[in-house]
């Protein structure tokens, strides 16, 4: 059950980060960071409780973090430009 929740949270996180990039605001950024934290927390729990190949799991997690980090940084920059105007 936690695996399904983890996948749903991670996919929602990527979708929400993309939406925040399109129309950023401070509330969306906070929700975006919450999704990222929830994804990391559920992923850590899964690694700690399940017998999985840690190398491939961590590699997948790093790819996820790279994608979401790029989207988040771009959204934050766009938001900063909007508020500076």
Image (spheres, rainbow, N blue to C red):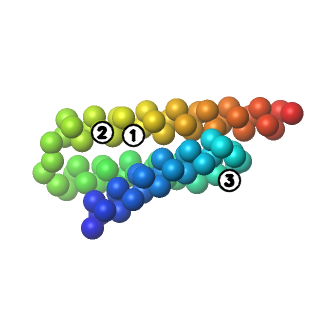
Mark 1 residue element: helix
10 Å crowding of disc 2: few (<14), some (14-19), many (20+): few
Crowding near pointer 3: few (<14 within 10 Å), some, many (20+)?
few
Q: Nearer the viewer, mark 2 or mark 3?
A: 2
Label 1: few (<14), some or many (≥20) within 10 Å?
some
- Mark number for residue 64? 1
Please state if 83 lies on the left or on the right of 51 as rendered: right
C-alpha distance separating marks 1 and 3: 22 Å
Residue 9: image location, x then y, percent: 42, 57
- Callout 1 touching callout 2 (CB < 8 Å): yes
Report x, y in % for residue 60.
30, 39
- Answer whether labels 1 and 3 touch (C-beta < 8 Å): no
Question: Gap in Å between the C-alphas at discs 2 and 3?
Answer: 28 Å
The image position of residue 77, as x and y in percent, is: 68, 32
Give the alpha-carbon distance from disc 1 to disc 2, as whole Å: 6 Å
Residue 19 x, y percent position in the rendering: 60, 48
- Tag 3 residue: 27
What residue is shown at x 64% (from left), y 38% (from top)? 75
């Amino acid at each position: 059950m936690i695996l399904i929740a983890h996948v749903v949270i991670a996919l929602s996180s990527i979708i929400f980060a993309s939406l925040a990039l399109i129309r950023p605001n401070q509330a969306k950024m906070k929700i975006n960071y919450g999704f990222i934290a929830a994804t990391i927390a559920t992923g850590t729990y899964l690694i700690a409780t399940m017998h999985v190949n840690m190398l491939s799991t961590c590699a997948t997690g790093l790819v996820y973090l790279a994608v979401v980090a790029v989207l988040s940084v771009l959204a934050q920059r766009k938001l900063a430009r909007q508020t500076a105007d």
